[in-house]
Amino acid sequence: MTACPCGTGAAYEACCGRYHAGPLHLLAPTPEALMRSRYSAYALRLREYVLDTWYASTRPEQMERFDAGVKWLGLTVKRAWTTSPDEGFVEFIARSRAPGGGAAQRLEELSRFVRDEGRWQYVEATPPP
């Protein structure tokens, strides 16, 4: 059993792996599930999954965290909630290390998600409250 990078303690195949491949691809049922699966995709360098789950109007052309070879060290979800059936937020902390070592870095973010045509998508980051 390989533990899922998102930190739930579940096996990858039973956790985020089911969203990365197979018939459930891209169908994470909640903003938190999508955020965790996106974190795991960053950790596993699944660029296409990250792009496919990014809202088209805010999707960047460059993805520095892939290109720079960042090593993802862990994820803590502080809270997750929905404001309507089609909008939700996840506040989290992700830890990483730059290539070649050095001090660990901490990314604290409040992410906004929308449900478009039945599937959740990442829209943007806002500063945490």
Image (spheres, rainbow, N blue to C red):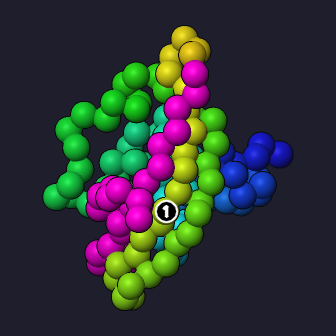
Dividing the picture into quadrants, the one containing residue 22 is bottom right
Q: Which residue is mark 1?
A: 91
Quadrant of the frame with the N terminus: top right
Most extreme residue toward the bottom is 84
Q: Secondary structure at mark 1?
A: strand
- Taking 95 as reference, is 127 above or below it? below
Q: Is residue 37 visible?
A: no
Quadrant of the frame with the C terminus: bottom left
Q: What secondary structure is the magenta-colored segment mainly?
A: strand
The image shows residue 5 at horizontal and vertical percentages of: 65, 45
Give the residue at x 78% y 55%.
9
The image shows residue 17 at horizontal and vertical percentages of: 62, 53
**In magenta stretch: residue 39:** no
From the viewer's perspective, is 14 left or right of 109? right
Amino acid type, residue under disc 1 in the picture: Glu
Give the residue at x 29% y 61%.
123
Most extreme residue toward the right is 1
Residue bounds of the magenta highlight: 103-129
Give the residue at x 42% y 49%.
49
Q: Return the residue nearer the eye: 104 or 35.
A: 104
Most extreme residue toward the left is 57
From the viewer's perspective, is 98 left or right of 62? right
- Taking 38 as reference, is 116 above or below it? below
Q: Is residue 11 visible?
A: yes
Dividing the picture into quadrants, the one containing residue 83 is bottom left
Most extreme residue toward the front is 129
The image shows residue 15 at horizontal and vertical percentages of: 67, 59
